[in-house]
Image (cartoon, rainbow, N blue to C red):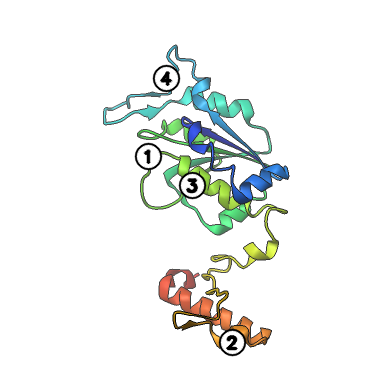
Amino acid sequence: MKIDILTLFPEMFSTVFEESIIKRAKEKRIVEINVINFRDYSKDPHQKVDDTPYGGGCGMVLTCQPIFDCIESIKTEDSRVIMLTPDGVSYKQEMAYSFAKEKHLILLCGHYEGFDERIRSICDFEVSIGDYVLTGGEIPAMILADSIIRLLPGVIEEESHIQDSFNDHLLDYPSYTKPQVFRGMEVPPVLISGDHKKIDEFRMEMRYNRTRERRPDLLEK
């Protein structure tokens, strides 16, 4: 997979993808990540990428020309352009699985007061990571990239993400490791019983109970 991230602040990504699992995925050539400053595509003498909004109002709005030219210079028939925006569709795990099947993703990071509305016409998806506003789309782009890359074949064991929270609208079960007793808190006896059928039943019950207590909205699905 190839992921191109379009941003005005490429330095924000300088270390994020150079650690841990994503770094190994890059070294294995499972994923190629490019961070592109779309200011470089501005035809303005001062490389401006924003301007005041028609109709008045506070802040500055990102202009069409640099973003259109940037996307059109890298887009192919295999590309899918994702705009990171507060008014996009709320990001879910099933979307991560869907995006992980694509060959080329272009993540467009906004800034300032947002995009010229016409930029939406060149995007395939509009995604929000939550009902709050950030200073820009860089952190959401990092979140999407991380959640997608870990699902690519060969990055982590398939069983690890199949059992993730949200895959079947349930949260994950509680996990324990050594020691068996820590400050009076014991590991549930069933987990050291060796009875895998009972362990599976216990874990499913814990998943349901945890979801009912913490995210009952998921059970409605």
Q: CA distance from mark 1 to mark 2?
A: 47 Å
Q: Nearer the viewer, mark 4 or mark 3?
A: 4
**First of labels 4, 1 by sequence position:** 4
Tag 3 residue: 127
- SS state under label 1: loop
- SS state under label 2: helix
- For this view, does 164 lie left or right of residue 8? right
Mark 4 vs 1: CB contact within 8 A: no
Which amino acid does the dot numbered 1 rest on? Thr
Write the residue at 58% across / 58% down: 94
Residue 176: % across, % down: 55, 75
Above/below status of 169 relative to 97 = below
Q: Nearer the viewer, mark 1 or mark 2?
A: 2
Above/below status of 49 relative to 120 = above
**First of labels 4, 3 by sequence position:** 4
Residue 70: % across, % down: 56, 26
Residue 114: % across, % down: 39, 35
Which amino acid does the dot numbered 3 rest on? Val
Q: CA distance from mark 4 to mark 3?
A: 26 Å
Q: Which mark is residue 48?
A: 4
Tag 2 residue: 190
Classify mark 2: residues with Cα within 10 Å, few (<14), some (14-19) or many (20+): some
